[in-house]
């Protein structure tokens, strides 16, 4: 699985303002299992805290800001492509 360079991770973090960028809906999951349901996730994180992941919007796509999202770990785990590579 490809990984974003540190410079792109910094851009993703800066764009996110330290807040998960996920806006996905997670039908069938309880609120405790999904931090949000279609609105922007309320989870915040710090740049070096290890509490977020850089996620590829298009799996296998380029390692650039336009193909990335700063996601909290829980939202990243809920993506369809999490752990694939």
Image: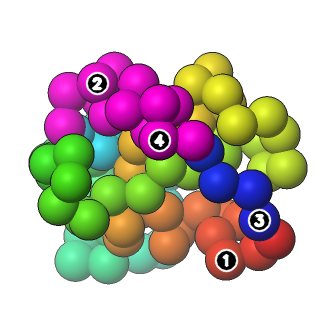
Q: Secondary structure at mark 2?
A: helix
Q: Give 31 or 61, whichever is nearer the viewer.
A: 61
Residue 39 seen in the figure: no
Q: Earlier in the sequence, mark 3 or mark 2?
A: 3
Mark closer to the observer (1, 2)? 2
Q: Which residues are magenta?
A: 5-18
Q: Earlier in the sequence, mark 1 or mark 3?
A: 3
CA gap, disc 1 and disc 2: 25 Å
Query: Which residue has dot 2 on it?
Result: 14
Q: Secondary structure at mark 1?
A: loop
Q: Are marks 4 and 3 in contact (CB under 8 Å)?
A: no
Dot 4 alpha-carbon crowd within 10 angstroms: few under 14, some 14 to 19, many 20 or more: few
For the C terminus, the image quarter is bottom right
34 vs 69, left or right, is left
For the N terminus, the image quarter is bottom right
Q: Residue at x 50, y 72 (%)?
A: 77
Query: Which residue has dot 1 on it?
Result: 83
In percent of width and height, residue 46 lies at 14, 48
Query: Which residue has dot 4 on it?
Result: 6
Q: Residue at x 43, y 57 (%)?
A: 53
Mark closer to the observer (4, 3)? 4
Mark closer to the observer (4, 1)? 4
In percent of width and height, residue 33 lies at 32, 78
Q: Residue at x 63, y 21 (%)?
A: 66
38 vs 16, left or right, is right
Query: Which residue has dot 3 on it?
Result: 1
Residue 13 located within the stretch drawn in magenta: yes
Q: Earlier in the sequence, mark 4 or mark 3?
A: 3
CA gap, disc 1 and disc 3: 9 Å
């Amino acid at each position: 699985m490809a990984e974003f360079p540190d410079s792109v991770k910094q851009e993703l973090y800066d764009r996110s303002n330290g807040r998960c960028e996920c806006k996905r809906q997670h039908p069938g999951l309880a609120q405790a299992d999904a931090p949000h349901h279609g609105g922007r996730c309320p989870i915040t994180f710090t740049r070096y805290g290890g509490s977020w992941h850089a996620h590829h919007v298009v799996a296998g796509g380029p390692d650039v800001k336009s193909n990335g999202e700063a996601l909290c770990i829980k939202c990243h785990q809920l993506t369809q492509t999490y752990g694939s590579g």
